[in-house]
Image (spheres, rainbow, N blue to C red):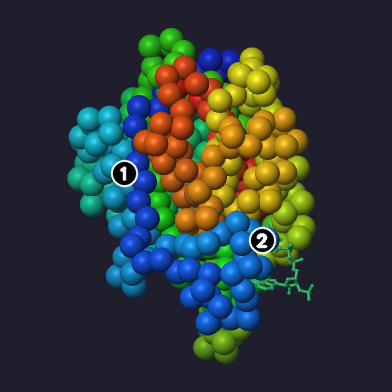
Amino acid sequence: MAANSDIAFKRLPVKIIGTGSYVPERRLTNADLEKMVDTSHEWIIERTGIVERRIAAPDEYTSHMGTKAAQRALESCGLKPEDIDLIIVATITPDTFTPSTSCYIQDALGAKNAAAFDISAACSGFLFAMKTAVQYIGTGQMKTALIIAAEKLSTVVNWEDRSTCVLFGDGAGAAVLQASTGEEGEGSVLATDIGSDGSLHDLLQIPGGGSRCPTTAENAHERLATLAMRGNETFRHAVTRMKASAASVIERAGLTADDIQLIIPHQANLRIINAVAQRLSIPEDKVFVNIEKYGNTSAAAVAIAFDEARRSGRFGKGDNVVLVTFGAGLTWSAAVIRW
Ligand code: ACO
């Protein structure tokens, strides 16, 4: 088990200057799922809070969604693709194992001055990417970073397994980061936290399709290249880790729960979100939720929520916003941003 911190950077000289998101058009409702597996709208809404999720078209890939979210993020801050010198894509559903999805996105954007690579931290990926970008910019190695979280989870869902297929959806979110003048506010990243516990790798995994268990003609029918989860245990760890990670960044930013205007948690389950907020003593009206529209889009979920919260005015100048996530690995991550 490992957790790291940015103790040396009480005030990181990095700010978020733009955000964007994209979700595919097709909606898959709970009523649609009732026709596919033995489930009900009532069960799904009561246990998860999800009403519908978006499903990408067959010819719409993770990189296509990521590119659209990135273009919106660049538009929102008036930068051109050539201004970007670092692209980090967080995904567990890359277009291909190699090249990286970030290279496809670099090409589609025309961001010819950027170095591009992917990271894999499941639902925690967007904030792992944020922390990575903060280190590159904070140490003067890079000037402008584009971080993207994009997922086409519909390609790794077993649509005959009711315990998982009701949970997931497709989408993408992005943010642009730059060195700041050092003054707080206007998107300053005040503190970040990432952590992992690999001993729990089998709680939530896609067991097949990699070098450990390649898909073969003999095992193809077992659908090993789809998401498998021990839901109850995952739930428990999610609450504990998200609470601890959020509390640590709030403290490291020199704040208390009362100073937080909005918390944007990973959108995996409404009951997890409520339990985390309650343990942090953050009231319901300060918690951003959009799980009813998109379900769990893994790394993309917190990125989409952050962009929607910004565009809809859920936070404004001077507000302290906490992002917090949890995912397979296990992994967890959190950040405090002063807008
Ligand atoms: N419809 C109807 N019944 C269902 C369904 C369904 N879709 N799915 C399961 N059930 C049944 C089960 O079979 C079980 O029946 P039984 O009591 O007869 O055995 C019953 O409902 C209860 O099942 P539980 O698994 O105990 O239900 P729970 O309340 O734990 O909810 C859920 C399941 C929603 C999956 C929850 O455990 C959860 O959200 N876990 C966390 C998921 C998560 O956070 N993932 C994060 C990371 S995702 C990533 O990294 C990609």
Q: Is residue 49 left or right of residue 126?
A: right
Helix, strand or loop for disc 2:
helix
Helix, strand or loop for disc 1:
helix
251, above or below 128, in the image: above
Q: What crowding class fits label 2: few (fewer than 14 Cα within 10 Å), some (14-19), or many (20 or more)?
A: few
Q: What crowding class fits label 1: few (fewer than 14 Cα within 10 Å), some (14-19), or many (20 or more)?
A: many
Q: Nearer the viewer, mark 1 or mark 2?
A: 2
Write down the residue under mark 2. Answer: 46
Quarter of the image that includes the C terminus: top left
212, above or below 300, in the image: below
* Precedes in sequence: disc 1 or disc 2: 2
Q: At 23% across and 52% down in the image, what residue appears?
A: 108
Q: Amino acid at mark 2?
A: Glu
Image quadrant, ligand 1: bottom right
- Whole-percent x, y for residue 38 in the image: 63, 81
- Whole-percent x, y for residue 232 in the image: 76, 60
